[in-house]
Image: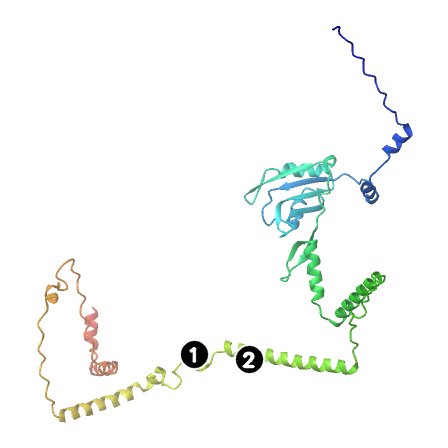
């Protein structure tokens, strides 16, 4: 068969939309974008250019106040922001410092880069005004004082919760009245909102009781009784503390109060001689009485047990090793100090002075 030519496909011309419809399509904007554009605020006119420095690897304890004081040596510091954790409020180790002039910020960044501070190498870099795309000094953290009176940084949410808790725990009369009025106003608004549905909140409302003169007197009496009870408790506590702190004299001195002390035996030196004479007379009388008494029979001597093996094997002291010289035995005087004094006095009275001539020869 002879070849057959296929007919060419006819070109279908596209229907051209009118220009007006295209222009309308270009102007179409979604509803969400319209809302965003409406909410967008007009841009504020740009102020003078400022220099910003970012400082990293900050040591612990180098906070806002320290940063401001330290960077003040380069020039006027306008704003300082230390990056902190939203959860704990602790420092993250880097901060932003804004200077009045960009030139000063550049000098500060160059000098503080690779600077050793408290065993940490600080890194600093300059952010020129063209590259300052964000507000580096915007933060959601708020400064709050804790129970100890120390300033700490917390998030806005935690600050709001702390404030609400403080308000709810305030039980003053004015504060309670404000809270009740606010709650009643809320319920009234809800009643107006659901009025069409036939819901009535009036039965649920419990209005605050108005105070009368009797009730005020009762409250005043209760308050006075509570204050008296509190004062009694505090007085009792103070007495207990005083009793604990002040020890008794008997505890300190023990049993020495009723007993005679050693100091009572003290005798003046002026009366020594008279007492010594009395002591000698008493000793003589005691010796005479002892002579008259019959001599008692002495008990028989006990038989010594035989020495054991361990005693025999023991080395006698001073037999082996380096022998040390024994100190001279100290003879304990049996005489009292009083008798010694008497003997000395008697010796002095008996001693005769040497003649003058002999004394001169002895000197030669």
- Residue 263 location, x and y as percent? 36, 82
In this rendering, position of residue 81 left or right of residue 291: right
The label nearer to you, 2 versus 1, is 2
Establish if 174 lies above or below 292: above
Picture quadrant where residue 332 is located: bottom left
Q: Nearer the viewer, residue 193 or 92?
A: 193
Label 1, secondary structure: give it: helix
Q: Which mark is residue 252?
A: 1
Q: Is residue 44 visible?
A: no
Q: Earlier in the sequence, mark 2 or mark 1?
A: 2
Residue at left 62%, top 41%?
Answer: 56
Q: Is residue 187 visible?
A: yes
Q: Nearer the viewer, residue 265 or 180?
A: 180
In this rendering, position of residue 205 left or right of residue 23: left
- Residue 73 location, x and y as percent? 67, 44
Quarter of the rendering occupied by the C terminus: bottom left
- Residue 144 location, x and y as percent? 68, 57
Label 2, secondary structure: give it: helix
Quarter of the rendering occupied by the N terminus: top right
Q: Nearer the viewer, residue 188 or 196?
A: 196
Q: Between marks 2 and 1, how big is the CA–CA gap? A: 20 Å
According to the image, label 2 marks what residue? Answer: 239
User: Total label count?
Assistant: 2
Q: Nearer the viewer, residue 11 or 363?
A: 11
Residue at left 8%, top 78%?
Answer: 303
Q: Which mark is residue 70?
A: none
Residue at left 81%, top 16%?
Answer: 9
């Amino acid at each position: 068969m002879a070849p057959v030519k296929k007919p060419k496909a006819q070109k279908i011309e596209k229907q051209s939309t009118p220009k007006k419809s295209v222009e309308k399509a270009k102007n179409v904007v979604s509803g969400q974008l319209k809302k965003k554009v409406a909410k967008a605020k007009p841009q504020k006119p740009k102020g003078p250019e400022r220099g910003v420095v970012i400082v990293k690897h900050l040591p612990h304890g180098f906070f806002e106040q320290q940063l401001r004081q330290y960077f003040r040596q380069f020039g006027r510091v306008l704003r300082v922001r230390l990056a902190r954790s939203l959860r704990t409020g602790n420092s993250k180790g880097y901060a932003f410092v804004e200077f009045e002039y960009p030139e000063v910020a550049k000098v500060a960044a160059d000098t503080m880069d690779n600077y050793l501070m408290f065993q940490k190498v600080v890194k600093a870099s300059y952010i020129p005004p063209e590259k300052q795309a964000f507000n580096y000094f915007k933060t959601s953290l708020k400064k709050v004082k804790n129970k100890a009176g120390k300033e700490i940084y917390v998030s806005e949410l935690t600050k709001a919760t702390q404030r609400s808790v403080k308000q709810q725990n305030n039980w003053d009369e004015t504060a309670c009245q404000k809270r009740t009025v606010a709650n009643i106003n809320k319920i009234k608004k809800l009643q107006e909102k659901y009025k069409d549905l036939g819901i009535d909140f009036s039965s649920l409302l419990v209005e605050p009781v108005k105070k009368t003169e009797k009730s005020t007197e009762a409250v005043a009496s209760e308050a006075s009784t509570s204050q008296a009870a509190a004062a009694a408790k505090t007085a009792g506590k103070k007495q207990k503390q005083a009793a604990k702190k002040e020890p008794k004299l008997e505890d300190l001195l023990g049993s020495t109060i009723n007993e005679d002390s050693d100091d009572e035996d003290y005798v003046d030196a002026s009366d020594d001689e008279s007492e010594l004479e009395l002591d000698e007379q008493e000793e003589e009388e005691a010796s005479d009485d002892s002579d008259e008494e019959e001599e008692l029979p002495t008990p028989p001597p006990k038989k010594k047990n035989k020495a054991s093996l361990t005693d025999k094997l023991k080395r006698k002291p001073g037999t082996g090793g380096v022998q040390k010289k024994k100190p001279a035995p100290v003879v304990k005087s049996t005489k009292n100090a009083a008798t010694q004094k008497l003997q000395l006095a008697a010796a002095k009275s008996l001693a005769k002075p040497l003649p003058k001539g002999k004394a001169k020869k002895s000197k030669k």
